[in-house]
Structure formats: C-alpha cells, structure tokens
Amino acid sequence: MREPTRIIGQSPALAHSLDQISRVAPINRPVLVLGPRGSGKELAAERLHFLSRRWDGTLDKVNCAAISDSLLESELFGHEPGAFTGATRTHVGRFERADGGSLFLDELGTMSLRLQEKLLRLVEYGEFERLGGQETLRVDVRVIAATHADLRKLAREGEFREDLLDRLSFDVVHLPSLAQRVEDIPELAQHFAIGMCSELDWDYFPGFSDDALQTLAQYSWPGNVRELKNVVERSLYRWGDPDNPVDEVVIDPFASPFTAVTPAPMPEPKPDETGSTTEPASPDFSEAVAAYEKQLLRQALAQSGQHQGQAADALGLSYDQMRHLVRKHGMATRKRRH
C-alpha cells in the first residue's frame, strides 16, 4: 500500500491541523476538511485514510466540481444497462469500488441538492441503488469531504442540505492558508526546488539568495501551497544557472517586461491669498531625486510582481543597478511578523 504524501512544515498552525487529523483518523466517522484552494485538502484526506483502520483498503478520490451533475451520479453510485442513452453495460460506481475503504469527495459544495439527498442516505445507512437499478446495495465506506466554500452559509440559503452537513461534520479539520504558516515557506520552497532540479537535470540545488527568500516571505500567496510550487519551479527554470543561488523570483508570469513606467506628474502651482499663483517651494535637490527614484522603483516593482529583473528592464537599468537602488532606498527590508 502506497504511503501518503508527506505534509511539509513545522509551523504551529500546521501542527495544530495535523494533530487534529491524527486524533480523528481512527474514529470511523465522516470528516469534513475545510481550507482555501491549494492548501492541501487532498493530502489531509490521504493522511486521514492511512492513519485509520482502513489503511489497507481503497482510497478513491472524486472532484465533484469537475463532473457534470448527471455524470456525477453515475460515477458515484454506478448505473445499470439502459439507464440512459449509451449505457450498455453495468457500471460499478466509486462507492462500490471503495467498499471497506474511504472515498474523498472534493469540492462537495458544488453537488446538487438531488445528489446530496442520495449521499445523505448512503452516509446514514450505507444504502443506495445504481442509476436505473432496483436492487438496494450496501457498502461500508468512510466519506471524507472537502471544500473551500462556506457550507453553513449555503445551508442557510437552501443550497446545501443541513441534515447532510450535520452528518458529514462529525469533526471539521481546518487547514491554514500559506499566509498563516509563513514559517514553512523556506522548507516548502526547498522541497519543490529540489524536485524541479531533477527535471532540469541539475546535479544539485544551489539554494535561494537572501533577496529571493525575502520575496517569497513577503508575498501574500492567494493560491497557497499550489501557487508556491508553481512560482518556485518557474523561477528555477527561468534562472537557468545551476551553479549560483536563485536570485530572481518570478511570481507573476503575466507581467510584461516591456510595460512602461509612467513618471509622477509635477506638483501644480497653488494660488496664494491674493489669487495669484506661485510655484511650490523647491525641495532639497538630493531629497527630491531620492523620492523620485523610490517612486519609480515602487511602481516598476508593483507592475512586475516584485520581479527585480523585469522591473530593471522596464526602467532601462541593469540588474546590478536595480539591486543597488533597492538596497540604497531600503526597499528590501523584511516585513515584521505579528
């Protein structure tokens, strides 16, 4: 039996979730896993299965959002010949195939109310009929469901059955977003980078520079661990130098290096008490130049997703000049963690 994929990280937030998974895994009840997209809900389901007494049984996985409602019923519960056009033979559904094991239902919030009713009966009594069939079948399957949706809100709005939600939520495992486990970013990035080195035929991973690690730590990661994996792999491929630490993090591949940076407008003259206009007082030359440099740097970095190489291209600077100016103006300082 294949071992579950290791969940990487040592942060207190992740440790709390893993501890909860370890405690609820041996209890033969449905479990609901909640967390944002890319936070590792499928890995949590694997861990729940392999730490349970069903570890030597089947763990089947279905993404409810990826299958239309009519096909999802057949996929989950099976169908008999003649159940619909093209149904020429008996199809054994996922619940029958997972008998004695676990079934992971991802994106449960997209399931129709009609299928929710059929799922409720199976969770409560272990009974169902294949689509187009008359025989009542029984299975012993542990349901592990996951979603990023607010199921309680959907239930209040009549879009999710409250009785099904009650049955599925014997316990609810909440997975933290990557922004809630910043301490894990270096270890995760290292793990994904080593995997990418093999694909790139690099003999070893040269590491990340301090600036690159700082960029990874300061980004908000709306796509969570899945987005971090993409960013790390993309950054290694674009860096292309197996002998020196990766110094550029490519967060936004859609950011064009040819986007022009628009300079800030000069301040308008203001009227004085007599109604005549006067030029604004001239600031210290050095301060004005420094302020203007910082403004151009901020705008270029924002447009390039904090990619210093692309920002340098947009400003017509070399990469070394860009790094010098960023350090000169203290724009690479690490944000405080609260």
Image (tube, helix red, strand yellow):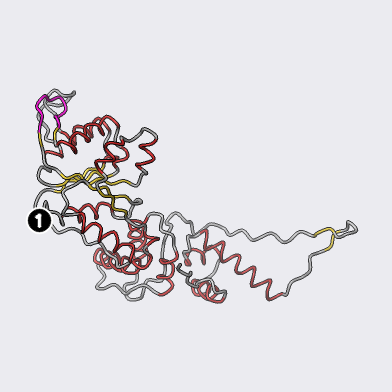
Taken as a whole, is the magenta stretch helix, strand or loop?
loop
In front here: 283 or 101? 101
Q: Name the residue under label 1.
A: 1
Q: In this view, does 54 lie to the left or right of 324?
A: left
> Residue 304 colored magenta?
no
Q: Quadrant of the N terminus?
A: bottom left
Determine whether 314 is above or below 117 in the image.
Answer: below
**Numbered label tally:** 1
* Residue stretch in magenta: 128-137
- Horizontal arrangement in the rendering, residue 193 relative to residue 126 (left or right): right
Magenta segment: does it hold 135? yes
Residue 221 image point, x, y percent: 41, 58
Q: Where is residue 300 shown, x and y percent of the image?
A: 54, 62
Q: Mark 1 falls on what kind of element?
A: loop
- For residue 88, above or below residue 319: above
Q: Say which of 19 and 269 sits in front.
A: 19
